């Protein structure tokens, strides 16, 4: 006899105790509190699902409603169900002791409170709450994982014991997904990491946390629902499938985070292979001529497996053949397939079979409750599958609307049946009223929230709806401003208009990621793919307004807009107004306001607008490094002088300089050359000195401070090769270096090969404010710069890319001037085959290895070389993404 058989059922066949209450007897089941816990969990699942349904119906008016609908269902309903049932199934499959139900209730409460915190934090744009809630979710799920691991220690086990490993792997996947989700929701991933992290988050959550426990449970649930014995190969197959799916998913997620598309494709292919093996086994389990215990549950589970196979196959094709933008859009299109086709049908099938078992006290009552849940199951199943097809296939918009309505109708009908079952369970003459009260309370909460959601979305209108502010009278002029979305910025980030202006915004997404724009109390666009545009009509503007991208995490990362009203009336739109935000014209209205002194030149509340335009007449500093002169003695004269220079787009500040530029001139020579540098102090108010790291001299005299009007000759012999820093030696050196008194000396190593291009990049921090002021000095001591930069200007090489040709060998000399931070220099899309750091080669061409970054601490230097494989635009960054997103970023334009 099969070890899972345990006596006859009402219809004469054997009932598997695995899906009976974990401690066997109904009376003991009640005493343990398991029944009441499962009942509360089902009410929570129904409540989360209802809220998800409401959010889905609000998509047209609330840009973030789609995100909420998905996460209410997956993070709320599905997570609650999985936490409860994986613990229950693990007890049965491992023949383990039942965990303390009070602690289980605490864990379940922690999960649900954390989920509510995550959703609230993202909705209300409270990053601190979001991070705290994500941490709480990680803690609760980790506790759940610990319980699952402890169950396996010392447990008797059985044929299905390997399935518990699916639940443990799934819990680990949710921990990873929660961490990635927190990074996304708070914007910590930044502009360059957002796409990969988002795809990784979607895959590890859907295929890991949702997919793996469903796959594992199907090995047991499928034959149970069919009323047949398990296939003899189930145990062996389950182990092999977990290796394929769990291992493949880990590789795929790592590949997506690291931007290794081939690894992501390989991992997903392994997952698909494991899924194919599972489907083959499930098909072999079916016995012709045998009617299932629950036809509704069996067909729902079969349909869910079919949709999962279709979704993974399509996802694999997307990642293997499409660009990043197309893959993003394609994965987004898969959401309704996974949400409704897979997850919803799994929940419907599982609840149809399991809920009567949990709620009933005997076979007769179980059959009656199941009959209630199976009412009209065939039309409901067909309608839900049709809804999924309408939402997934590339059909006209009315088809998607019809699919949404159809899915909502099916969901409501099943929720009504669940409420009916909860209200009629128990003895006919003594019905339990607690579930009815709980269900009614949940329904009331859902209704109230629906009213609130509908009310808050009332001002949204359509994606291009007008929402002008009243009280402004008749507009005297109409102005149209073009906005571009990209690189985690809205450009321009600040628009100044005269009071009473009728304002229209032409919004264009110029990014691989999808973005939207929501105006506070006004209209919003739909999510826009790369190149898509929408126009928002704000009506008459009489007060300041704010706007932002509603994609979770993007507002926190800096995608905000300020509309500032100036007094008076409009003076008429101009052609320049219409061109604001267009390529090459960014910041003409918002960012090109040069400032000096303590003024920061920043957009209020958002920091520097690095996407703005530079002032008229601005010229970038040439990064090209000339070859070392043939002479063996190099003479130079450096004047210590104050200069007001543009340090960021539209932002000017007084700097202390060597030779009028920050950094000072780059000097170059060979080993054995002599450098004779004359320092002239033209600063009328303070003394300065100079320290060349490339020389070895006593600091007492050659580095001494000279007073205004004095001269000092600094002479040294270059005995060692390397990329060296020089800087002012006068105390406090933190302020002298931090205000621009630094530069580089390049001493070629012997036998240095010729490169097609050589560039010198000196990295440093930018501290805005009056040089030497208390406020600026505090920033330096606390290491809170306003930006990071290459060659003294934040983001200058975004506006003026470095130019090379495909196939050229390019050498980048890098010196980290600090004064506090180092650099991790990286060129996106390339691998370095040569690395020279601090006077030694770490890597040379021809070897098997490669390097991805040149890591330098403050006052270190070196060079890296690469060959650009093909035409395109290659970003070079400080891979500390805080620095890259705040100015340490440039572009190599390969023709």
Image: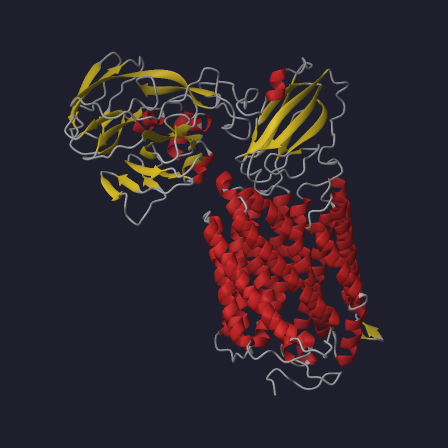
Q: Quadrant of residue 76?
A: bottom right
Q: Position of residue 648 (x, y in %)?
A: 45, 24
User: Relative to 790, is 156 above or below?
Assistant: below
Q: Residue shown at 57%/64% (left/top)?
A: 275
Outermost residue toward the bottom in this view: 1
Measured as percent of width and height from the top left, residue 545 is found at 65, 28
Image quarter of the N terminus: bottom right
Q: How is the image coloured?
A: secondary structure
Question: Residue 550: x, y in percent?
Answer: 62, 39
The reply, left or right, for residue 232 in relation to residue 368 is left
Using the image, determine if residue 641 lies above or below residue 275: above
* Residue 125 located left or right of residue 39: left
Q: Is residue 819 visible?
A: yes
Q: Closest to the observer: 882 or 242?
A: 242
Front-lying residue, 359 or 799: 799
Q: Quadrant of the C terminus?
A: top left
- For residue 415, side relative to residue 105 (left or right): right
């Amino acid at each position: 006899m099969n070890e899972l058989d345990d006596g006859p059922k009402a219809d004469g066949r054997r009932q598997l105790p695995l899906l009976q209450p974990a401690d066997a007897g109904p009376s003991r089941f009640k005493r343990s509190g398991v029944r009441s816990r499962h009942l509360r969990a089902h009410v929570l699942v129904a409540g989360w699902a209802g809220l998800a349904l409401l959010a889905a119906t609000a998509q047209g008016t609330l840009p973030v409603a789609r995100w909420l609908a998905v996460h209410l269902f997956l993070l709320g309903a599905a997570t609650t169900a999985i936490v409860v049932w994986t613990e229950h199934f693990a007890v049965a499959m491992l023949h383990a002791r039942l965990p303390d139900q009070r602690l289980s209730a605490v864990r379940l409460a922690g999960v649900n409170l954390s989920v509510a915190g995550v959703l609230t934090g993202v909705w209300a744009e409270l990053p601190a709450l979001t991070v705290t809630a994500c941490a709480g979710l990680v803690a609760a799920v980790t506790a759940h994982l610990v319980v699952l691991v402890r169950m396996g220690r010392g447990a008797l086990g059985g044929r299905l014991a390997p399935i518990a490993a699916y639940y443990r792997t799934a819990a680990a996947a949710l921990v990873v997904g929660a961490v990635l989700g927190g990074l996304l929701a708070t914007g910590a991933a930044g502009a360059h990491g957002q796409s990969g992290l988002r795809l990784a988050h979607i895959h590890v959550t859907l295929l890991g946390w949702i997919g793996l426990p469903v796959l594992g449970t199907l090995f047991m649930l499928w034959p149970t629902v069919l009323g047949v014995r398990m296939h003899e190969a189930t145990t062996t197959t389950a182990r092999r499938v977990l290796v394929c799916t769990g291992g493949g998913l880990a590789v795929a997620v790592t590949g997506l985070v690291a931007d290794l598309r081939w690894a992501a494709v390989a991992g997903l292919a392994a997952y698909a292979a494991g899924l194919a093996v599972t489907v083959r086994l499930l098909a072999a389990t079916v016995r012709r001529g045998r009617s299932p215990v629950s036809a509704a549950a069996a067909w729902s589970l079969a349909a869910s497996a079919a949709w999962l196979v279709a979704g993974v196959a399509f996802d694999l094709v997307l990642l293997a053949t499409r660009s990043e933008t197309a893959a993003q859009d394609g994965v987004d299109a898969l959401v309704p397939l996974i949400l409704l086709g897979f997850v919803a049908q799994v929940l419907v099938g599982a609840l149809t079979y399991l809920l009567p078992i949990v709620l009933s006290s005997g076979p007769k009552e179980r059959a009656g409750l199941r009959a209630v849940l199976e009412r009209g199951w065939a039309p409901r199943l067909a309608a839900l599958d049709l809804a999924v097809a309408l939402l997934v296939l590339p059909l006209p918009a009315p088809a998607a609307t019809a699919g949404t309505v159809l899915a909502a109708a099916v969901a409501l009908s099943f929720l009504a049946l669940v409420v009916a079952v909860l209200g009629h369970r128990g003895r006919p003459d003594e019905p339990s009223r607690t579930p009815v009260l709980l269900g009614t309370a949940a329904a009331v909460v859902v209704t109230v929230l629906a009213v609130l959601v509908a009310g808050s979305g009332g001002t949204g209108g359509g994606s291009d709806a007008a929402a002008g502010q009243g009280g402004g009278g008749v507009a005297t002029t109409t102005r149209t401003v073009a906005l571009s979305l990209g690189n985690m910025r809205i450009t321009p980030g600040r628009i100044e208009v005269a009071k009473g202006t009728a304002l229209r915004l032409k919004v264009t997404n110029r990014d691989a990621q999808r973005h939207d724009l929501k105006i506070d109390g006004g209209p919003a666009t739909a999510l826009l793919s790369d190149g898509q545009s929408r126009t928002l009509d704000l009506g008459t503007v009489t007060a300041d307004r704010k706007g932002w991208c509603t994609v979770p995490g993007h507002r926190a990362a800096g995608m905000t807009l300020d509309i500032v009203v100036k007094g008076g009336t409009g003076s008429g739109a101009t052609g320049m107004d219409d061109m604001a935000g267009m390529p090459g014209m960014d910041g003409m209205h918002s960012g090109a306001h040069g400032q000096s002194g303590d003024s920061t030149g920043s957009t209020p509340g958002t920091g520097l607008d690095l996407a703005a335009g530079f002032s008229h007449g601005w010229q970038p500093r040439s990064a090209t490094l000339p070859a070392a002169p043939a002479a063996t003695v190099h003479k130079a004269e450096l004047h210590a002088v104050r200069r007001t220079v543009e340090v960021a787009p539209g932002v000017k500040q007084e700097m202390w300089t060597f030779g009028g530029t920050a950094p000072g001139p780059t000097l170059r020579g060979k080993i054995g050359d002599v450098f004779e540098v004359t320092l002239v102090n033209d600063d009328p108010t303070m003394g300065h000195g100079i320290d060349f790291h490339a020389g070895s001299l006593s600091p007492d005299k050659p580095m001494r401070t000279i007073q205004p009007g004095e001269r000092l000759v600094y002479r040294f012999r270059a005995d060692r090769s390397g990329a060296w820093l020089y800087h002012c030696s006068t105390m406090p050196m933190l302020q002298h270096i931090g205000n621009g008194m630094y530069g580089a000396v390049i001493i070629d190593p012997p036998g240095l090969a010729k490169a097609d291009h050589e560039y010198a990049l000196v990295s440093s921090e930018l501290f805005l404010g009056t040089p030497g002021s208390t406020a600026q000095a505090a920033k330096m001591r606390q290491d809170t710069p306003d930006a990071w930069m290459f060659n003294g200007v934040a983001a200058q090489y975004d506006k003026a890319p470095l130019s090379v040709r495909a196939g050229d060998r390019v050498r980048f000399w890098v010196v980290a001037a600090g004064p506090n931070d180092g650099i991790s220099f990286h060129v996106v899309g390339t691998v370095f085959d040569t690395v020279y750091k601090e006077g030694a080669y770490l890597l040379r061409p021809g070897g098997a290895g490669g390097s991805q970054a040149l890591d330098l601490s403050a006052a270190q230097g070196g060079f890296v070389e690469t060959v650009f494989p093909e035409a395109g635009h290659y970003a070079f960054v400080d891979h500390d993404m805080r620095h890259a997103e705040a100015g340490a970023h440039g572009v190599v334009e390969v023709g």
